Structures are given as C-alpha cells and as structure tokens.
Image (cartoon, rainbow, N blue to C red):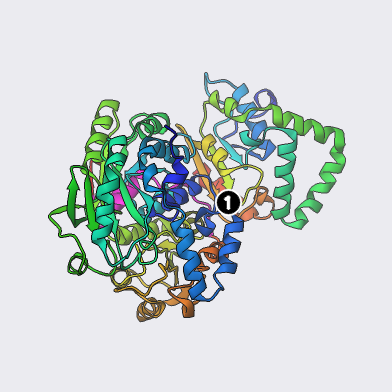
Amino acid sequence: VSRESPQRVVASFDSATVLHAAVAGSLRGEPFPHLGNGAAAGAAMRVGGGLPWPILKRLYTRIGASEGIAPERLPEVDMSAVAQWLADGLPGRRYPTVLVGSSNGALAHLAAAMQVPWLPGTVLVPVSRVGDPRRPVDACEFGRRHAPAFLDANPDVALHHMHDQVQDELMVARMTYFRTKWRRLPQAYAQFLTDVLADGAPVVLVEDRSTWPVARVGERHVFQPGAQGGRPPAGYLDQPHTPSADDESPEAEWGADPGLGADLQRWCATRGHPLVRISFTGPQAPAHAVAALMRDWYSQRGEPGDRLLVPSFVLGDPWRTINSAAVPFWAFFSVQPALRALEEHLHRSAPYRSVDILLFQHGVRSEGIAAPDDWVRTVRRHGARPNLLALDPRRFPHDIATIGRYGRAMASLPSARSPWSPLDVSHALAGLREAGIDVSGL
Amino acid sequence: MRIEARCDPVDLLIGLSVGAQVVAVAAAAQGGAGSPRIGRLMLVSPTVDAAARSMPALLGRWIAGGRVERPRLFREQLPDWRRAGSRRLLTVARSALAVDLERLLAVVDVPVDVVHAEHDKITSHAYAAALASGDRRGLTIVPGATHSWPYSDVGCFADLVERVLG
C-alpha cells in the first residue's frame, strides 16, 4: 500500500503546522514571512490580494480546498510518519527542555525566546468534501463513513472531526476538518526527546484543558459542531441540521488529549526527566502571562519594553518579535473574546507607547468578529499608539495579501538595543506561575 | 602555544570569525589538566559552518555576507588584505576549512560564549546555537547585526565583553 507523504496529509494553514514551523524557524534564527512559504508564494499573495473579492474568494477557497486529501486515501495516512516529519523539521541539538502538546501562539513565542522546540499534540488532516456549510449533519455522516479506515490504520490517535460554518465558512464548503490528536507519545517524538534532551532536563507538557460539546461517533471519534471563536457552543448546537451533543471532549483544535500527557509522564518517569505541566483553559489564557514575562525579560535586557505586538492566530514571527524586543500578546483569532483579553492585559499592565496589530482574516465577517476599528479604539483607550501592521483596513476581512506583506512589516521593526541570551527555562516557568498560569512539577 | 610560553594567563580570549577557530585551537592545545592559562573563550561569529565547509560554499556565503555589511568595512579591511597577499589569504581560507571547530570544542575545558549576529549570512544560527549547547556554554544573539558587527559597534562589543567578564 502506498502511503501519503506527511506534507501532503497535514494542512499548511493550520495552527499546529504553522506555529511549529515558526518555532522551528526561530531555532534556525530565521524570520517567518508569508507563513513560512517561499518568496514566490509571498509575491503571489501580494499580487493576488489586489483582485476584486468575488474573484479572490473563489481562488482562496479553491487553493485552500486543494490541500484536502481524497477520502478514499485516508487509510494511507500514516500519523506516525507525520510525527516523524514534525520532529525532523526541528534542528537537532542539545536543548534544556522540549514543549509537547497543545498548540498555542503565546507559548510558541515563549519557546522561541527560550530557544526550545515544540512538538504538537494535534494536527489537522483536511479531507476533500463538497457540501453545504449550513448542514453539519452531512459532514458528520461523511466522517462516520470515511473515518473508520483512517482510525484503523492509526490506532494511536483520536479523531475530532470539526465543522465550523461560521469562521471556516469558505473552507468547509469544499473540505472537512479531521483534527487528529495523539493519545500516546509517537515513537518519533520519543526518539527526538531522547536525542536532544540534556541529562535530567525537564519535558514541558502544554495542556489546554478546554472542552466542547460533541456528538460521539465512535470510541476514538467525535464530531464537534463549531469551534473556539466568536460564537459559544450553544450558538452552534442550536442551528438546524446539527447533530445533538451527547458528550464533552477536549476542544478539537486546541484541547489536549489526556492520553498523550499520561504516556509522556510514563516516558519521563522511566528516563529520569521531570515532567512539568503548563495547564490552562482556552487558547487565549496564557497570552497575558507570556506578555508580562517577556516584558520583564526585556527590561532586564535593558530594553524599554514599551512596544506591544499583537500576533493573530498564525500571523506572526516569533524570531523578529524577540529581536525587536516587542512584547507579544497573542490573539487566537480576530474575535471579541481575544479583544477583551487584550483590553484586560492593557488594563493590568504599565502603559505601552505603541501597539502593532496583526489581524488574521478568514475572509468572512463572521459572528463575534473584532474589526480593525475595534482593536484601534481599544488600544487608544489605554493611551497607546495603534498601528495596523500590513493591513488595508478597508479590505478587512478580505485582505488576504496581509499574509504576503506582514514579513516585510516585521522586518522593518526597529531592532532591539542589546544582545540577548535565550530566556532561562526555570525562570520562564516560574514567571508563568507568578503570572497566574497553573505550572506544576517545577 | 605562544600564550603558554610568553604571556600571563588570560581571563578571556576572544576570536572573531576565523579568529574564533584560532582561539579554539589555542584553548584545545592547553589541554584539560591543571589551571588553564586561558580562562574563557568568546567566539564571535564563529566559522566555518559545517553546512558550508567547502571552498565554493564558503565563497558563496562570504559574498552573501558582504552584501549586508557596511560598504565601509571593505575599505577598512582592504589594506590588511593587501598586506597579506592573495597566497596568504588562500592559506587562511584553506586552514579555516580544515579546522573543525565543533571537534576542537569537544576537548576545550573552559567556559565558551558563542556570539551570533541576527543577520549573519556566513555562519548560520543553527551552527552557532549547536556550538553553544552543552555544559558551561552560552549563546548570545546580537539583534540587527551582521557577521562583522564588532567593527561597526565598538560600544556594544565592549559592553558584551564586560558582561561576560562579570
């Protein structure tokens, strides 16, 4: 049986793969323009982004949908090869720790500051499927039909089939989201940890404990209507043609499968590596703590720390952020809950002089979206100067060319004043705890 | 060897670029036993990156590095190069390619600080970071800087040396 190549299997636009690539880039000391795509792709995005939205919308949807694999090829997907590909994407050298688990942009920036790798616990396998986005029940039936062969071929994973017709309206018309969580430590991850960890170095489990109501389809298969963003679960479940929820499960994109944590704990116990858990609820939760911690670190480096940068979902560049001594406050999407979190951060922090804002766009004005003006007003209310980086606000939420432009904008940020050394791991973990994040095992 | 024979012990020996290889040779030559005559090494923009260890690759990186350096640097270095002559410069390049810095550091028994510039096109960050990983090793990154940054930012260089010396 031929196997699908790992790069072909996982989505290149997903939080896990893009944040993983951004962290890997920072470990290679490389900036991260156009989400890690080549210069030609960046130029195409900038040029294509100028097309009228009705044309661009079709292109955007088609290109995104082209990432989906044919459902009949699902049995050929080898998730252990995906894990190997993710481990191979990280520079091999001695590290003081490795992060494993939930995707989180704030912690990706922290990993870059500590110069340590992160191995994702969840990846997205997009599957080709044409259907009506307003009929999640059809997507669920599609999963019931096609997922068993995929799960039989991959006994160490659980499938969280996700359908968000609000934020992913354009994409779910032509593909469906098989979010896949490892329930055991993949062999490739175990080997990577063995190869790169210093003797007695801790392993850090990143554990987002957020859950979502789901319809259980099988022992390792749930269907999640909706996703974290601007609409709460009830807002999805109340919609017609939506399967009823009969269970609660780790959130498909961000939530941690407890099986991976348990297996990692066993691995650590037998190898003499302490396991440290960073636990929180929801992707937005660590952003304030990371920002506060990094601002403090910049101050110790002699930097003013008065410039805040708001990376958005996968739109960001940890390496350039740190080298320009910009304080990162990561927003999981451009939605009202993330905006409220920024407001809270600005309220709790000493004033910033300026705030650079990156806004990732899904191409739809979805419920709960936070528009550029909302971000600008919030920043102004706290006495800072807002700056929408690489964005034409008149085209929001369709300014897809932002993806091709933000790299240049990040490159033009002024450099930090002083040389720096990677943030000490113990200091970082203690700092997270001081800032209110649950860190155990220190 | 000259340090051992003629000079007082030094607290910190600094090498820039191929100079990093020279100081590593000196530190490796002093061995591990007894009190070291070199107390600490600082390797600034150390060469030659393992991924560019051939004459064409090194030349390619050197040209790429030259594009991001200040134009004045070339004028500043030219008199030295003239004095050295092409034959000696070629010897330096051959010698740099022959000296395997990571192997040398494996037998160096003193603390090592590796300093890497953000925009260094000659030495990769991955190589510098790999040299800096391990006990009593440290990595320092100089934001916005290029391979030969100490020539243009003497103040920053002096501050860094002061910081390392504690």
Reply yes or no: does residue A415 show up in magenta.
Answer: no
Judge by depth and name the residue closer to the eye, B26 or B126. Answer: B126
Judge by depth and name the residue closer to the eye, B55 or A56. Answer: A56
Tally of numbered tags: 1
Q: Name the residue under label 1.
A: B118
Lateral position of residue A331 relative to residue A46, left or right = left
Instruction: Give the x, y percent position of residue A340.
Output: 28, 72
Reply yes or no: does residue A428 show up in magenta.
Answer: yes
Mark 1 residue element? loop
Disc 1 is attached to a residue of which chain? B
Name the quarter where the C terminus of chain A is drawn.
top left
Q: Could you say which quadrant of the image residue B85 lies in?
A: top right
> What amino acid type is highlighted by mark number 1?
Glu
Lateral position of residue B124 relative to residue A226, left or right = right
Q: Residue at x 28, y 45 (%)?
A: A147
Q: Residue at x 65, y 32 (%)?
A: B21
Instruction: Give the x, y percent position of residue A204.
Output: 31, 42
When the figure is inspected, residue B135 is found, relative to residue A49, above or below; the finding is above
- Range of the magenta residues? A416-438
